[in-house]
Amino acid sequence: MSAHARPQPEATDSGFTLVELLVVVAIIALLVAILLPMLDGARRQATTVRCQAQQGGIAKASAAYQSEENGWLPGSPGTSGSVLLADRYDGAPDTFEHMPDPPVQIWDWAGPLARQMKIGLPANRGDRFGVLVTGVFECPANYFRAVPYYTSGIGPVGTFKAQRMVSYNTLRQFMSWPSTAGAPNTECVYTVSGAQLARDYLPRIDRLGSPSENVFLSDGSRFVNATGGLDFDIGWRAGFGGAFSDGGPTIPDNFLRSFWRYDPQRRFAYRHPRGKAQGLVAVYFDGHSAYLSESESRNPDPWWPRGTRLARDEFNEDSYAKIKDAFNGMSFYTVQR
């Protein structure tokens, strides 16, 4: 062994240089830019799937209700809502709170189905409203709150409070009688001048047309004002569908602001975007649910009973564009399914 010590290697700096650090940061930023939209899209897709599952569960409860009620649909003033039109409530103000019967108003489909699903309901109508917008009745994409509205102008009263916006609406036209059918009460006669229900239509599952092609519930909102405020009708004898039923996304743009094509308030109804497109979720009377883009939702047939005759002024521009060739020179369009 040599008496001379071996030379030691020079110490080297093992840290990142500034250039290397910047490259790593740039790669991380690139990966984040790529992955974030994918993660956001996956999150939105999961929300849509949950919404479809919610609506599917409601549709099953509706099918059970129909089975027990000889095919009649829940949510009509002439079916489940007729209990509120019984003699014991004659003369009661719209804000009357002490109504232990399941529906909170004559168009309410949720109260009867909550009873079907064994969900406990408060006897007070104001408290019951709060139950019917949460849990199984709440769309996971509905983050909006609505305040009570009373049509006489005296303002909110009693136990009616600000709450989650009603997530899902039925179609008033499916819950109504034509004027020729001997309706059980005047509230459930369909009276829009631009639409004429088929003479033999009744709100029964066997009169719809095709249950697999007719919408039972869909995303929506009742009501939206011009400044984007949300409120809900607390009247138990609410008109024009009340807080639970509307006309769907095919009717003229001077109705239902949340379905207006160019109005920012449409986010209340079209709350399931895919990419740059807006969309909503609907469940059909046979129990299957589907995502509909805004364009797909404008087709009028799924939103009306078969045989309904619709005048030109009953369509918004997007819906009219889809069926204008079917007019064939006539003054009305007849729903085909």
Image (cartoon, rainbow, N blue to C red):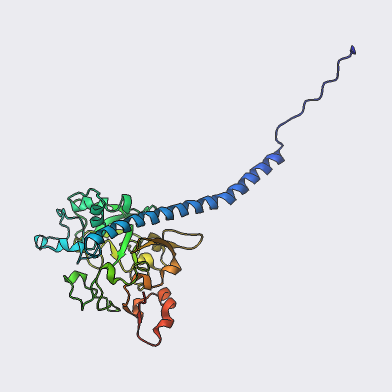
Report the quarter where the C terminus lies.
bottom left
Which is nearer the eye, 67 or 157?
67
| Residue 225 location (% of width, % of height) | 32, 63
What is the x, y in percent for residue 197? 28, 76
237 to 47, vertically: above or below: below
Tell me the quarter of the picture where residue 188 sits: bottom left
> Count the marks: how many?
0
Q: In this view, does 332 lie above or below 48?
A: below
- Please tell me which residue lies in front, 79 or 84: 79
> Where residue 326 appears, x then y in whole percent?
41, 82
Q: Residue 172 appears at what percent x and percent y?
A: 28, 68
Residue shown at 25% from the left, 79% from the top: 199
Task: Locate the N terminus by quadrant.
Answer: top right
Q: Nearer the viewer, residue 318 or 293?
A: 293
Q: Nearer the viewer, residue 281 or 94?
A: 281
| Vertical arrangement, residue 207 with respect to residue 47, above or below | below
- Position of 40 with respect to 60 (left or right) is right
In the rendered image, is residue 316 in sight?
A: yes
Say which quarter of the image contains residue 147. bottom left
The residue furthest bottom is 329
Looking at the image, which residue is at 39% across and 63% down? 266
Residue at 26% x, 50% y: name it.
Answer: 131
Q: Relative to 312, is 81 on the left or the right?
A: left
Location of residue 40 with respect to 262 vertically, above or below: above
Task: Report if residue 141 is visible in the image.
Answer: no
